[in-house]
Amino acid sequence: MKEIFKIKLNEAQIKKQIKILHRGISKEESFNQLGLDVRYNTLAQFKERLFFYGNKSKYFWNNEFLKSSFEFEINEVSDKMFEFIFNSFKIVYKSPKNSNTEKYIQKNKVAFEYFSNDEMEKHFLSNIKKLDDTDKIYFRNYYLTILHQLGDLNFANKSLFLSSTTDLVQAHRFSKKDNLIINFWIVNDNSREINKSTNLPLFAGKPYKQQKETSIFLCILPHYIYSFTYRNKEYFNPHLAIKNEYDYDIIIINGIDVNQKNFKNKLRNETNFKKGVSLNAGVYKIID
């Protein structure tokens, strides 16, 4: 039945209802997030916790992030937030760290020159103010995604985003030879397109096109993780109990039903996450 579910996922992807993604991560890092030690804990213990807690960005567990001046609320759309974005692109433009960033700057010279001009900061903030909060968050995440993927500011180490890819070869490369891959899907919001009439700078393409990266905001919820693979063996989400063919469509859109009873206390006692997150009708809320 689980293999049939994967076939159904592929069919939904062909219909552009969803996107199937893979996140390569080292065994040590993935165990550590969940309060486990690769020297003493088992893959069975990892399996139990991954499919209960999911996989979260470094915002939730990296002490370096929590100590930094970068920290902000997940729904924050203040001037300070967009000032940070403006200045971050300016730093990248003035001091690119590698040739790939230099190529991306040349490809998007108009956008980067906009952010490098101090006089344009007021223009940028003024146009952001004209947006409603939903669009502000959308543009905030759009810009932060570019910064996350560029990686020039070491932003990935303090990021609200998780890197994933549609390419299994790239996922294996990021797993640092451990061959631990988290397999999941996201539901496409085909109704949402970027508003190009805002007079805000936009970027063409992705910084590392060959990586086929999709940046995931905050976390990969366990409700959308169908399996993980370790050394080419696949371990399915135990909550993926499909009783009849009608369950497929429901699960693909709404996610797997996961019993997360006593989640808050377990999170504190069992993992290295500093906080959790819930998602309801597209709105994220911190659990601490």
Image (cartoon, rainbow, N blue to C red):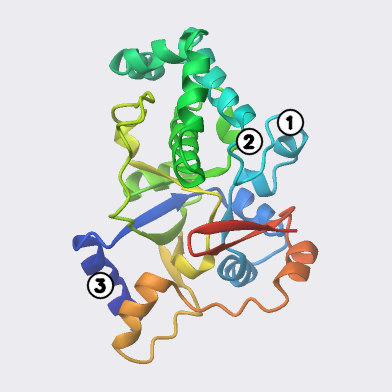
Instruction: Give the CA distance from mark 2 to mark 3.
Output: 36 Å
Query: Residue 154's spot in the image, x, y percent?
Result: 58, 26
- Report helix, strand or loop for mark 2: helix
Pick whichever of labels 1 and 2 is earlier in the sequence: 1
Q: Return the residue at label 3.
A: 7
Q: Return the residue at label 2.
A: 158
Q: Residue furthest bottom?
A: 243
Q: Amino acid at mark 1?
A: Ser
- Report helix, strand or loop for mark 3: helix
Q: Considering only vertical position in the picture, is 219 above or below 159?
A: below
Query: Residue 57's spot in the image, x, y percent?
Result: 59, 47
Q: Return the residue at label 1.
A: 68
Q: Considering only vertical position in the picture, is 133 above or below 273?
A: above
Pick whichever of labels 1 and 3 is earlier in the sequence: 3
Q: Is residue 151 left or right of residue 250?
A: right
Q: For the C terminus, which image quadrant?
A: bottom right
